[in-house]
Amino acid sequence: MSERSSPTHAMIFAAGLGTRMRPITDTLPKPLVKVHGRPLIDYVLNAFATAGVKDAVVNVHYLADQIEAHLAGRKEPRIAISDERHMLLDQGGGIRKALPLLGDGPFFVANTDAFWVEGPTSNLRRLAQAWDPERMDALLLVASTATSVGVDWPGDFHMDQEGRLTKRGQSEVAAFVYSGVGVLKAEPFAHDPREIFRLSPFLFEAAEKGRLFGLRLDGLWLHVGTPEAIREAEAAIDLSVR
């Protein structure tokens, strides 16, 4: 794989309102909610720093000043802010606005309401190594629905032996959940004229074309969507390090 085709930047989604995390998020943005004393966004950014990703774009909207202040002293990865204070653009629109900062090559995306306990090898490095733009429009890091922490829905995707993902049917249970982390191409977002739009339709369209792939997370994935999930995540971390 050429250096040109390997992702070098990350888009970190930190603009959401965090409504399910209320009342904590009445005064604190969700990316700064702490699990074991560490803000959620730091778990994600630390993973990218460890994987050697040098540049991260963080979008901000709700209580944006707090997030900017928290990130001001970070050296690795280097942080660029994509300011959405005027209007929440959803993930697709957020990517489109941030493209001048991300460049025109493939890039990582990551939510800030989940993180993972690593296995033997960095999952982000594995994701970058597995990325194949000839076959893929998107590559998602997926985790086991049954063994992940904080999963209160019946999964997101089925995955075949080659790693291709298909969307879970409405009445089905799927073996894999989307971890909120993946590698995407820039072109579909650069060509979209809308200002506000979602990311998921792009993923589902790629799946229909047979160009959405998954890589199974090595380790333990923790989804922290509610105040109760904070305690679940802390207990799971305690068990994992024994």
Image (cartoon, grey):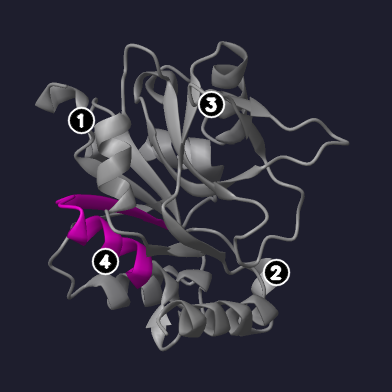
Of circles 1 and 2, the one toward us is: 1
Q: Residue at x 23, y 42 (%)?
A: 9
Left or right relative to 77: residue 61: right
Tell me the crowding category of disc 4: few under 14, some 14 to 19, or many 20 or more residues within 10 angstroms, Cα based.
Answer: some
Magenta residues, start to end:
42-61
- Circle 1/circle 4 CB separation < 8 Å: no
Which is nearer the N-term, disc 3 or disc 4?
4
Is residue 197 among what the camera can see? no
Viewport quadrant of the N terminus: top left
Mark 3 sits on what residue? 194
Residue tagged 1: 6
In 3D space, how far apart are the residues under numbered discs 3 and 1 (Cα atoms)? 27 Å
- Which of the two marks, 3 or 2, is nearer to us in this view? 2
Quarter of the image holding residue 98?
top left
Which residue is at the front of the view, 114 or 166?
Answer: 166
Mark 2 neighbour density, 10 Å: few (under 14) some (14–19) many (20 or more): few
Name the residue at 18% across, 71% down: 74
